[in-house]
Amino acid sequence: MRWLLWLYPRAWRRRYGREMLALLEETGATWRVVLDCIWSAVEAHFDRELVPQADEPVVPAVAAATAIPAEPEARPVVAPRRPFWSLRPDGLETAIDQILSAAAAEGAFDNLRGAGQPLDLAENPFEGELATAFRMLRAAGETLPWIALGREIDAEEAQLAADLERATERLRELASIDPAACGAERARARRRYLERAAAIDRKLAEYGALIPHRQFDRGRLLPHVAAARFDATCPPPP
Amino acid sequence: MSLGLPEPSFLVLVSLADGPKHGYAVMTDVERVCGVRMGPGTLYGAIARLDNLGLIEPLPSEDRRRPYRLTQAGAAALRAELATLERLASTGLRRLATS
């Protein structure tokens, strides 16, 4: 039954493999179980919410004694997952990189037609039968709604991060001038940050409903994640 | 549901609401309460999703089996989902009764 686990991504196996094998041994293998695992393994390859973010340590035994933790867990903010087309064993990527580097060093890419010239980005060789539709969209300065919404979210996330940096800097200055006012000012900044993060999260939910395929999904900005981000960048005064 | 969680994830949250459980205990609990037998792949898909969203967290392993429990965020999310469902159910039943 262990072979079923090899269908899952490596990071997933490392995190859940042992316990899932124990469960498979308890349930036994039927055709239904095998099909269920195959489907779930395919999902684990494509759904970013299913791939473990890191090898997170489990809650220590002392903390485990309480039923529910008193404080929300401050999860580390992780880099976005690699796109699905680069989900290959690292060894293979390295080998391809080596082949390309060796070929470039031997001059295999020298004297190619158009070398050194800028690419004509107006030409899209993959448009096919949709060329006319794409031309009309370009002429009108438009793009698909989910792409436009994605750009809007990018801009708002960047603005939110920049504003957080500025607010942190301002609070640092205030701490040296008037430490007593710092707590209230930070609470105001945190509230504003969380309100804007919630607005972005609503757009992320809308974006998730518009995308044509899960591979474009960007996940959500849930309140506890936004709060952890704020607290990590702008920790409360000692 | 407000979080847009798929049904298996919701069932796992409900199962963990009365305390930590490992995978097999969640599976039998869900079967007892809802009559739905989740496959191991579906169950661990839901566990991985909730774990990554910070709605549940693992506890130290008992042998190879690892128990999970709700985080504070998970309890809040479940409470919100259940309140929505409760409103929906009572509205639906009231409308059926008057039609």
Image: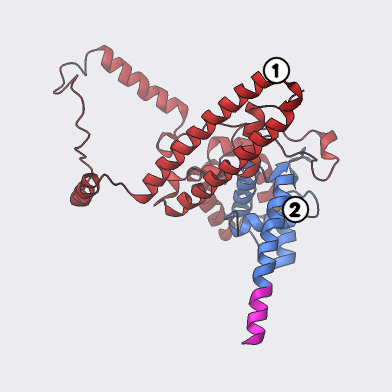
Chain colours: A red, B blue
Give the SS element for disc 1: helix
Residue name at image x 66 percent, y 59 percent: B81
Give the SS element for disc 2: helix
Q: Chain of mark 1?
A: A
Residue A34 makes an appearance in the image: yes
Pointer 2: residues within 10 angstroms few (<14), some, or many (20+)? many
- Per the image, the residue denoted by label 2 is B16
Pointer 1: residues within 10 angstroms few (<14), some, or many (20+)? few
Residue name at image x 80 percent, y 45 percent: A68
How far across and how far down the image is residue A27, in percent? Answer: 68, 55
How far across and how far down the image is residue A130, in percent? Answer: 22, 51
Examine the structure image and report whether residue B95 is included in the region drawn in magenta: yes
Q: Nearer the viewer, residue A22 or B93?
A: B93
Residue kind at label 1, given as amino acid type: Ile
Main SS of the magenta part reads helix
- Per the image, the residue denoted by label 1 is A177
Magenta residues (range): B90-99
- Report the quarter where the C terminus of chain B lies: bottom right
